[in-house]
Image: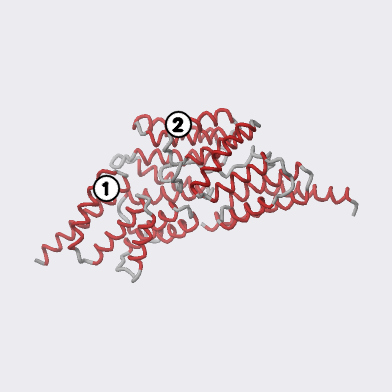
């Protein structure tokens, strides 16, 4: 009987691993059917390490579903009291916590967790999990504008995803997009174009509409960064034809900015109104500040009250969004320079310099 | 210090800081902190 239980436990362990693979592959149908089957099977399981592995995967599943309330609940349950964790379990615990923080827009905490997970990476034998870890590291570093680190991890990830036994095209597209975006950040537009082109080719082959919209959005950003506003707006408007697009607000913000660059103020005002209302509905503080700063910098007639500048920069600092602090500090400094208010201009250029130093410091710490 | 000198000193400081930051911004033209999108990029958008 004891032996029979052991066999059953080994089978469950394999089944759990399979569930994890389905989540990595984002295969919705298989994820759901495995979840249902496992929730029945696990009712009778009392082996603590298997139960713990199951709980970790439930945590990962709730992040995949973007059910952050449930994710928080699960992590509270499994962290206290301290679990019977092996090195592998510790890897997954920190890796999944990192994914959770990244999904809830806290890149700094995500990196802290990924760095803890890294200590146990050599105990992981699943190639797909290692590639996924590198992909996530690459994406968080991209969000933090740490280009060198991001490109390095993404190259490792794409190599694994391209292996014949894996050939995970959705993730290859993700890597191509992120590599292209990193090159946009450092203004290597020729290289960026190659990666976006690779992504578009694969997207067409797969016929995946969600990914196709992402490529179009990034092409909008790609043209915006080259000061080709007309092309940028054209691509971004194509994106917005898809009403349920998840990153709608980001596209609206970019369009507003492009109309401002092109000095088409009536259009800019229209998109600004739309964006402000969306940010407010979503209660997105960051975009509320960004839209209001754009208004104050380029659309408002009033020259008197500049308290929003200080408030906005303080908010981005408190969120440790140093790239945003640098970006808007420069814009504010230029605003004052054009008005020959050199005292204020100096203050905001100094602010931008400090933010840049902070970004460099954070990159050096990795 | 005369107003002119003060103004010139501040202008010089701005110029030094601009070179330290590493670029000369032109309003919305030069620098961007906007991030692109990719599978699993964070989003809190719930309403359109």
Is residue A352 visible in the rendered image? The answer is: no
Image-quadrant location for residue A89? bottom left
**Which residue reaches farthest right?**
B2
**Which residue reaches farthest bottom?**
A81
Image-quadrant location for residue A70? bottom left
Q: Name the residue nearer the viewer: A147 or A311.
A: A311
Q: How is the image coloured?
A: secondary structure
**What residue is drawn where x is 64% and y is 42%?**
A295
The mark nearer the N terminus, 1 or 2, is 1
Q: Which residue is the site of mark 1?
A: A31
Where residue B24 appears, x then y in whole percent? 69, 41
Q: Name the residue nearer the viewer: A67 or A199.
A: A67
Describe residue A306's horizontal placement relative to residue A48 as left or right.
Answer: right
> Quick check: do tags 1 and 2 share a chain?
yes
Helix, strand or loop under label 2: loop
Q: Residues within 10 Å of mark 2 (few under 14, many from 20)?
A: few
Relative to A93, residue B2 above or below: above
The image's mark for residue B47 is none
Is residue A146 visible in the rendered image? The answer is: yes
**Which residue reaches farthest left?**
A1
The quarter in which the N terminus of chain A is drawn is: bottom left
- What chain is tagged by disc 2? A
**What residue is drawn where x is 70% and y is 53%?**
A350
Q: Which residue is the site of mark 2?
A: A241
**What residue is drawn where x is 66% and y is 51%?**
A308
- What chain is tagged by disc 1? A
Where residue A153 appears, x then y in whole percent? 44, 48
Helix, strand or loop under label 1: helix
For the residues bearing labels 1 and 2, Cβ distance under 8 angstroms: no
């Amino acid at each position: 009987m004891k032996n029979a239980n052991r066999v059953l436990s080994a089978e469950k362990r394999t089944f759990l691993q399979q569930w994890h693979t389905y989540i990595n592959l984002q295969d919705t149908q298989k994820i759901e059917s495995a979840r249902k089957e496992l929730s029945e099977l696990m009712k009778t399981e009392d082996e603590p390490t298997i139960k713990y592995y199951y709980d970790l995967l439930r945590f990962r599943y709730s992040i995949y579903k973007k059910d952050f309330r449930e994710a928080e609940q699960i992590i509270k349950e499994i962290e206290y009291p301290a679990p019977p964790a092996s090195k592998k379990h510790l890897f997954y615990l920190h890796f999944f916590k990192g994914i959770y923080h990244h999904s809830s827009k806290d890149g700094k905490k995500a990196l802290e967790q990924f760095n803890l997970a890294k200590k146990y990476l050599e105990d992981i034998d699943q190639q797909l999990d290692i590639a996924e870890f590198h992909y996530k590291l690459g994406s968080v570093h991209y969000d933090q504008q740490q280009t060198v680190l991001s490109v390095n991890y993404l190259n490792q990830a794409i190599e694994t995803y391209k292996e014949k036994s894996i050939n995970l095209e959705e993730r290859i597209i993700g890597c191509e997009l992120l590599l292209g975006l990193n090159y946009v950040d450092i203004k290597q537009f020729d290289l960026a174009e190659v990666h976006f082109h690779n992504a578009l080719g694969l997207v067409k082959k797969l016929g995946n509409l969600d990914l196709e919209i992402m490529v179009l959005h990034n092409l909008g950003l790609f043209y915006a960064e080259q000061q080709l506003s007309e092309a940028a707006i054209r691509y971004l408007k194509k994106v917005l034809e898809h009403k349920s697009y998840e990153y709608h607000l980001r596209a609206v913000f970019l369009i507003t900015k492009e109309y401002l660059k092109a000095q088409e103020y009536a259009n800019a005002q229209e998109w600004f109104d739309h964006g402000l209302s969306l940010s407010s509905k979503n209660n997105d503080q960051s975009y509320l500040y960004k839209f209001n700063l754009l208004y104050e910098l380029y659309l408002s007639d009033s020259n008197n009250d500049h308290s929003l500048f200080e408030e906005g920069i303080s908010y981005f600092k408190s969120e440790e969004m140093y790239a945003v602090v640098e970006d808007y500090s420069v814009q504010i400094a230029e605003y004052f320079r054009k008005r020959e208010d050199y005292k204020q201009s100096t203050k905001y250029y100094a602010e931008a310099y400090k933010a840049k130093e902070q970004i460099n410091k954070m990159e050096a710490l990795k | 210090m005369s107003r002119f000198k003060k103004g010139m000193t501040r202008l010089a400081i701005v110029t030094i800081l601009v070179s330290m930051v590493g670029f000369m911004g032109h309003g919305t033209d030069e620098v961007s902190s906007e991030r692109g999108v990719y599978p699993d990029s964070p989003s809190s958008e719930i309403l359109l």
